[in-house]
């Protein structure tokens, strides 16, 4: 039986040609000239003054926290409905994640829950653009400002999204993107930080290279500058081979967004009246990049049964993302009832820029059959 795949990158000859150029240049390692070129272009696309490429979004979040000054003993309020990288990054920085519940319509963090979670130990907030849809940044910025906290945008899935006319990546003090294979633009693995804060990005740049200014900053000098190492950094570099792929992916972004939007629109038309299934929303003033298409399945049908029914018929699908407070690692007693509910009911169906009209219709018809048979 043929499969309709859940996610698929759009890569081809142009990416291969860009990789060949990097091979010829001899600079395959990270933090080189191709990374620099991509960083300039990516910052412009995100509407920020600076960008730094990283090996993953998890690395970008970790660097953002460290550069924002998070220290052991701090608390950081984190959107509960997210991939575990968001909470993990807080633990990596030696701080404690305090999870805040989601909103039932957008699945992004509830600003009221964020404010309620703030204590005397809180130093920052991480909001998440769920499936790419930006959170309520006007409210979140106001809360962060009122309490003197930094605000991080986990924009892992949000390349190309916007909020009230501003691009994802520019919506908080600093943002973290993922270029993992299931994201809207990808180099297989990878990530980036975007920010207007030159000092923060400079601090992150040093930390992403073992605490040493990247070698490219010493290129062209006739001296022999030998850096001294005064802080514990990491190897969180993106390679220039990956940056070459990202340069082409960035060129493709408008076309990829349009293709995903077409898929979302068709799904909306085909599924809006299906009982027991709720389609995702795109609130006014926000542009969804449709990294994933998350349905909510009524508890009476059972999300898992619907998922197995789809898989049996060759339609790939998976759960939405995690309710962080339920993950044993974090050992938290916080309750986030909305996030828990959407964690149990969410279903991601095929979403990528290469889906054909026939595949979209097959997904919708199969889902309708499975849901009808369970009703
Ligand atoms: C919201 C969110 N944050 C962070 C990550 C981690 O991204 P990476 O795998 O690039 O570290 C993901 C990955 O799916 C994510 O969805």
Image: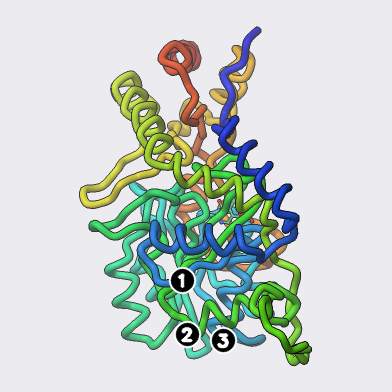
In the image, residue 248 above or below residue 233? above
| Residue on which the image places disc 3 | 69
| Residue on which the image places disc 1 | 50
Please name the residue shown 47% across and 30% down the image. Answer: 353
The nearer-to-camera label among 2 and 3 is 3
Q: Is residue 93 among what the camera can see?
A: no
| Residue on which the image places disc 2 | 119
Mark 2 or mark 1, which has the lower sequence index?
A: 1
The CA span between labels 1 and 3 is 18 Å
Q: Is mark 2 within 8 Å of ligand 1?
A: no
Q: Secondary structure at mark 2?
A: loop
- Residue found at the very far top of the displayed protein: 1
Q: Secondary structure at mark 1?
A: strand
Please name the residue shown 53% across and 60% down the image. Answer: 37
Rendered-image quarter of ligand 1: bottom right
- Residue found at the very far left of the displayed protein: 284
Of 328 and 191, nearer the camera is 191
User: In the displayed structure, does residue 130 sit left or right of residue 146?
Assistant: right
């Amino acid at each position: 039986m043929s499969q309709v795949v859940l996610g698929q990158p759009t890569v081809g000859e142009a990416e291969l040609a860009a990789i060949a150029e990097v091979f010829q240049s001899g600079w395959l390692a990270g933090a080189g000239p191709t990374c620099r070129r991509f960083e300039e272009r990516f910052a412009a696309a995100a509407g920020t003054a600076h960008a730094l490429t990283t090996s993953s979004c998890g690395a970008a979040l970790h660097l953002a926290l460290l550069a924002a000054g998070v220290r052991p003993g701090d608390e950081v309020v984190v959107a509960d409905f997210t991939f575990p990288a968001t909470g993990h990054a807080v633990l990596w920085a030696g701080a404690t994640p305090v999870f805040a519940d989601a909103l039932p319509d957008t699945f992004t963090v509830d600003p009221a829950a964020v404010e309620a979670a703030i204590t005397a130990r809180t130093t920052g907030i991480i909001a998440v653009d769920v499936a790419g849809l930006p959170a309520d940044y006007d409210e979140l910025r106001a809360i962060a400002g009122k309490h003197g906290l930094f605000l991080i945008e986990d924009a892992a899935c949000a390349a190309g999204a916007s909020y009230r006319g501003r691009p994802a990546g520019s919506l908080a003090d600093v943002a973290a993107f993922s270029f993992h294979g299931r994201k809207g633009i990808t180099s297989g693995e990878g990530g980036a930080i975007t920010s207007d804060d030159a000092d923060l990005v400079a601090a992150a740049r040093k930390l992403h290279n073992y605490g040493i200014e990247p070698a490219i900053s010493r290129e062209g000098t006739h001296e022999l500058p030998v850096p001294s190492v005064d802080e514990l950094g990491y190897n969180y570099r993106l390679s220039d081979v990956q940056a070459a792929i990202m340069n082409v992916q960035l060129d493709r972004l408008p076309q990829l967004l349009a293709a995903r939007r077409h898929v979302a629109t068709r799904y909306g038309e085909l599924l809006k009246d299906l009982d027991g299934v709720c389609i995702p929303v795109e609130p006014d003033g926000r542009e969804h990049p449709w990294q994933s298409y998350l349905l909510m399945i009524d508890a009476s049908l059972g999300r898992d049964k619907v998922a197995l029914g789809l898989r049996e018929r060759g339609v790939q699908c998976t759960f939405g993302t995690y309710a962080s407070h339920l993950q044993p690692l974090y050992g938290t007693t916080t309750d986030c009832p909305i996030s828990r509910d959407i964690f149990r009911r969410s279903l991601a169906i095929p979403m990528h820029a290469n889906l054909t009209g026939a595949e979209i219709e097959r997904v919708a018809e199969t889902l309708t059959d499975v849901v009808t048979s369970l009703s």
